[in-house]
Image: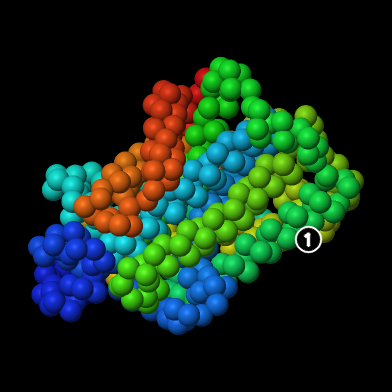
Amino acid sequence: MSNSAVLEEAPPETISTERLSEMSFTAATAAEVPGAIGSLSLEGLRRSVRLPDMNAKPWLKYLAFAGPALLISIGYIDPGNWATDLQAGAQFKYQLIWVIGLASLMAMILQIISSRLGVVTGKDLAQTCRDHLPRWTRWPNWLSAELAIAATDLAEVLGCAVAIHMLFPHISLLAAVIITSFDVMLLLLLQGLGMRLIEAIILLLIVTIGVCFFMEIFVLPQTKPNFPEIGRWMFAPDMPGFFKNSDLVFLAMGIIGATVMPHNLYLHSALVQSRKFSKDQTAVRQAVKYNAIDSSVALGAAFFINAAILVLAAVVFFGKDHVTLGSGSVVTFDDNTDWIQASYLTLAPIVGTIAASIIFAIGLLASGQSSTLTGTLAGQVVMEGFMHWRIRPWIRRMITRLCAIIPAIFLIVSQGRNLNVNNLINLSQVILALQLPLAMFPLMYFVSSKKLMGTHRPGLPLLVAGWTFVLIITALDIYGLPGTWQQGIAMFTGGSGS
């Protein structure tokens, strides 16, 4: 193996006065940079997108800044979200739609805060942790971030494998999982297209999915939901009943883990630095503003899609033990139904059963591959940021994918036809939820610092909201940890978990 293919400690950077000015936006941060900064993450994408003149029209400025949150939002409608939303709607109707709303609001606030950290400091969250937290925290923080990325990739592997199996039924699920290990060529091709083209592809995917769900919910009479009932569960949920039902708590943790993803907090703070804006106070305020708008729009769209998945699953599946297809064949449901493999039925009313299967499979495959791209970028950010290690992207991709494929193959081989892909994906999302505090607490600690953020420190309402969400998620993690442990043991031993 060549020297360039192995892990290396990035060489120290000699920082000139001009370079120091470029890397820092506040006097307080600039004073701390010498000896703290090593290599910059995602250097190939950094400052690669030009912006219009400061006097340009606001909508032109927004379009120029829009994009990083789009890449983040695709992780909010990946196979993990499909699995948790489908199961929530199929088993509990609209009872958990408030969790999707709350999780989306949490994600929106935390991603806005993450983008602000990247814009103001010129460093991503992983780099900031390395520079300002005790040295002993680097390894546990890096390893926990890698675990979150591996858990995310497990969902992508299984989602892509299900999609391949649906498109080509003669390919077994095990073979499809193995095929997903060769997606590295597609990933490298996408990375070579440039940031703006990648963002355009992601936008097209999101719009396509959104249009399909909009037509089903608002146009087709056979899938029109009960909107007053949805509003009742969104704004007046049964909280005592929620905490009495461990299955609801476990699934809610999965929804939160699938929505507020820890590696996205690291990634977003790096992606916002792809825009080439000047370092004066006015330009920084403008960048903070338009990145906040970008996050709100992109994650608002992701909320609609996630809510639509749950609603359609409730309309099509809840309270039913079977569905009769247009061909006359019957699909039966029970407690062990793998909802993600039956989820193409939610599209059947709009395009027919056969076309629904194909469209759903292509959409699932596309979302899995898109999330694979952002997951790999996040892996580079946390490795370079925490450890100052450099590794070729394709090697990084293969290592991450193997960490996901090995447990997937083990479960498929050991459980065979009894394997419930939906449950396994849900478990991976709960693991993400358990990792969240390790990313959220440092993020909120840094953006709350006047010394680090200077005049661009968030206002009191944003800080209160951010800290409140951090405490809610952490409390939910602690409450649900025993049940999560039991579910995990049951998954790998074939037990019931009860």
Closer to the camera, 201 or 4? 201
Query: What is the image's colouring?
Result: rainbow
Q: Where is residue 365 in the image (x, y as percent from the top left)?
A: 59, 60
Q: Where is residue 371 in the image (x, y as percent from the top left)?
A: 50, 59
Closer to the camera, 134 or 278? 278
Q: Mark 1 points at which residue?
A: 355
Q: In this view, does 257 lie above or below 455?
A: above
Q: Helix, strand, or loop for circle 1?
A: helix
Which of the 4 image quadrants contains residue 45?
A: bottom left
Residue at 45% x, 82% y is 53
Closer to the camera, 312 or 484? 312
Which of the 4 image quadrants contains residue 362?
A: bottom right
**In the displayed structure image, the side of residue 43 where residue 420 appears, left or right:** right
**In the displayed structure image, the side of residue 199 where residue 127 appears, left or right:** left
Q: In this view, does 449 lie above or below 273?
A: above
Residue at 39% x, 48% y is 459
**In the displayed structure image, the side of residue 59 where residue 315 appears, left or right:** right
- Few, some or many C-alpha atoms within 10 Å of disc 1 (few <14, some 14-19, many ≥20)? some
Residue at 78% x, 39% y is 227
Which of the 4 image quadrants contains residue 383?
A: bottom left
Q: Is residue 288 visible?
A: yes
Q: In this view, does 164 lie above or below 440?
A: below
Residue at 37% x, 51% y is 458
Closer to the camera, 345 or 182? 345
The quadrant the N terminus occupies is bottom left
Q: What residue type is labelled 1?
A: Ala
Q: Position of residue 141 (x, y in %)?
A: 26, 46
Total numbered circles: 1
Q: Where is residue 319 in the image (x, y as percent from the top left)?
A: 78, 29
Q: Is residue 90 visible?
A: no
